[in-house]
Structures are given as C-alpha cells and as structure tokens.
Image: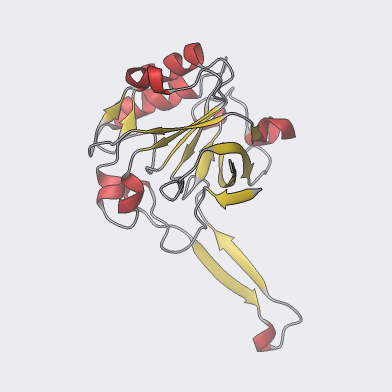
Amino acid sequence: MSYTFLSFPLSKETPGYGGKTNFTSKSVKSMCSGDSCNQTVLEFDTHLGTHIDAPRHFSESGKTLDEYEPSFWISKNPHILDVNSMPGEIIELSQFKDEISQECDFLIIRTGFEKYRHKEIFWSSNPGFSPESADFLRDWCKEIKYIGFDSISLTSYQHREVGKLAHKAFLDDDHPILIIEDMKVKHLSSKLKSVVISPLIFSGADGSPVTVIGELNQ
C-alpha cells in the first residue's frame, strides 16, 4: 500500500482568504536555552490553510466537528474531478455529471489553482462554486459526505455574496456536505482507494485545520 498527503502543513507562509496571513509559532521552552524540553505555542485562524468547514460555520444549529462519529472521517469512495478553472469562475458541478461517479462519498476537484498558492491570484481571483451544485451532488451522489478542492475557498473572492449562499447550501443542516479547502492534489497521478480526514477536534469546532491522507490504488 502507498499513501500520500493531500493537505499542506501550516506555516507563516500559509495563504489566507483575503490575503491575510495569521499563523504564528512561538517557542516557550527550549532545550538549547536550558529547559527540560522543547515546547511551542501556536496561534491561527481555524479556517486557515488546508481546513474543513463544519455545518456550524454558517448555522447556529449546525453540527460541530466534535459531534461526528470516528467512522465519518473515512472516505471509501473518493473521486477526483479535473476542472480547468478560469480566475473568478463560478463552477457549476452539474455540468460534469457524466464524469462524477454516483458511488462517490468524497468529491475532490482539481481546478489547477494550486500552482498559484503563493501568488496574489490564489486568493484574489480564486474560482468558487455555485449554490446549486450542492443540491446536484446530494441528488447524484447519495452517499456524499464532503467536497474538497485545491483553491483557497468555496467562495470566489470576486463573488462573495454567491459564496455565502454556496456555503449555506453545502452545509445545510438536513444533509450537510462538509467542505475541505486548499487541498494538495496536483501531484496525484493515480486514483485514490480511500482517504482519511483528520481534523483538529475541539469542543464546538465550526472548522479546523485538517490532515488529509490518501491511499493510492496500485
């Protein structure tokens, strides 16, 4: 078996939505300074870097990440969809119906924007997704649990009102589709057999940085 990371590590260079960079790392104990161990304090927005949006992100009654069972975090039928996106484009997923497996429980969309990750265009002109795409996925993929992609947000920075509606549509309380933003996928050259999604779990989490590990088909 072979595995690969589908997420980026957090760092001071991690791009944030709107061009913000708000990750700090501070050493509070150092063996080099005579302390008994090394210890670090981190400060960051929970919606920074490769992260997952919970239903609570856009709904006071929505579930938080800590309310899901462990089995929820295993994808057994991931599917990769290549969509060569233009800057600021609103992607309508129903246009790709014939390319999406109905057995899919995790739709990973490769827009090509990962190559811009450390350029302004990555956050200022990122593609987004239409609100209607959420209902399409629920109807087409009955077992869908999450959507992920290689751009910075489900919301295009150029179309923020549409993006708010899209977030609410995907995270709908009745059948939420959780959202994983800023994924690492351009290196994939083979299909995925399964995916493990491991968010930082804390009480009341409306979102969290997430480690995503893919098992490759041999």
Q: Identify the residue at image location x=26%, y=45%.
A: 124
The image shows residue 46, relative to residue 137, as above or below, that is below
Identity of the residue drawn at 32% across and 43% down:
112
**Rendered image quadrant of residue 158:** top left
Residue 88 placement, left or right of 28: left
Q: Nearer the viewer, residue 98 or 166?
A: 98
> Image quadrant of residue 29?
bottom right
51 relative to 169, above or below: below
Of 13 and 113, the residue lying toward us: 113
Furthest residue to the top?
139
- Asked whether residue 69 appears in the rendered view, the answer is no
Q: Quick one: 91 or 53, which is closer to the camera?
A: 91
Identity of the residue drawn at 66% across and 35% down: 73
The picture places residue 115, in percent across and down from the top left corner, at 32, 52
Between residue 160 and residue 6, name the one nearer to us: 6
Relative image position of residue 121 (x, y in whole percent): 25, 49
Is 77 displayed left or right of 125 in the figure?
right
Q: Identify which residue is drawn at 24% across, 36% down.
A: 88
Say if 45 sits above or below 141 in the image.
below
Across the whole image, how many numbered discs are drawn on residues? 0
The quarter of the rendered structure image containing the C terminus is top right
Whether residue 73 is visible here, answered yes or no, is: yes
Q: Which colour style is shown?
A: secondary structure
| Place of residue 99 in the rendered image (x, y in percent of width and height, measured from the top left) | 40, 23
Q: Position of residue 42 (x, y in %)?
A: 57, 62
